[in-house]
Image (cartoon, rainbow, N blue to C red):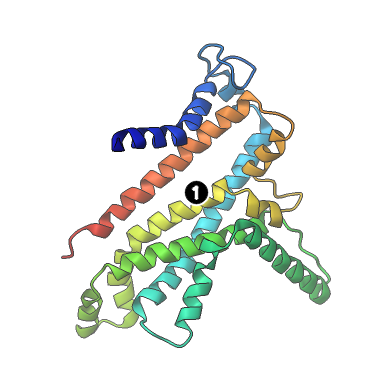
Amino acid sequence: MRRVGLVLGLGFLWLPILLLIGYAFSADRIPFQWGGFSLRWFAALAANARMLDAAWLSLRIAAGAATLAVLLGGMTGWVLARHGPFRGRALFGLLAGAPLVLPEVVTGLSLLLLFVVLQGAAEAALGWSPDRGALTILLAHATVGLAYVAVVVQARLAGMDAALEEAAADLGAPPFTVFRTVTLPLMAPALGAGWLLAFTLSLDDVVVASFVSGPAGTTLPMLVFSQLRIGLTPEINALATMLLAVTALALLGAGLLLRGRNTPRS
């Protein structure tokens, strides 16, 4: 019975995705009707300049947001894991992990209000009003990804023996040298996994981006969502298949990087 339940559960989760992937290779113009194997919709997708521009923008935003999230989230996780109790630690940890539990609508609305206030302040102080677009989406995605990176890094360092760093300090290494030669290599798998997770979250996001974007900041998920209101096309099936492949590869890479987390200490 357990195996039957497992098969039914996995089938319920994966059957729609597998159907979407299968119909991406259909030659029929109707999105959910099989008309023989064909790659025509992938070729049509490659010729769609609007989708390609949105995809390139999404990739750039995801890469930038993931890099910024690793820099900030890595420091946050390191502080929480290695600096012990300090005044305001509980509040600091709560604020750092807030994006993990807040609904995306609340996160997007709060970031929108922040950007509107900053836009008004810049206009009042400099006489210049920056438009919302790719930069605001990047900052919003970095804010969300920061929380995930911090959790991964904190868990990584919590499972590592601090005696290695203490031994390096006892041998006369200054704090920066200890961090560069001992702590940072220990954090490297978690930082890589956190980058991939933040990249995937940014690449797939549509809710937060819809709140903080402007006319010049239409990402690929936002473009797909707007086209769904008109009607599905086979190109969207092909696009979804490619996004699934990219996401699966990113998550697989994150899993491989985190495998070192449970290796024996030496």
Residue 68 visible here? no
Image point (38%, 65%), residue name: 153
Residue 137 % position (x, y): 64, 56
Image point (55%, 34%), residue name: 240
- Note whether 164 is above or below 61 in the view shown: below
Residue lying furthest top: 36
Image point (33%, 32%), residue name: 4
Left or right: residue 79 versus residue 230 is left
Image point (52%, 11%), residue name: 36
Residue 45 % position (x, y): 61, 27
Which residue in the structure is indicated by mark 1? Answer: 200
Residue 78 % position (x, y): 39, 72
- Note whether 123 is above or below 132 in the view shown: below
All told, the count of numbered labels is: 1
Task: Return the residue nearer the eye: 104 or 196.
Answer: 104
- Identify the secondary structure beneath mark 1: helix
- How packed mark 1 is, by other alpha carbons closer than 10 Å (few <14, some 14-19, many 20 or more), is many
- Note whether 95 is above or below 244 in the view shown: below
Task: Return the residue nearer the eye: 240 or 199.
Answer: 240
Q: Amino acid at mark 1?
A: Thr
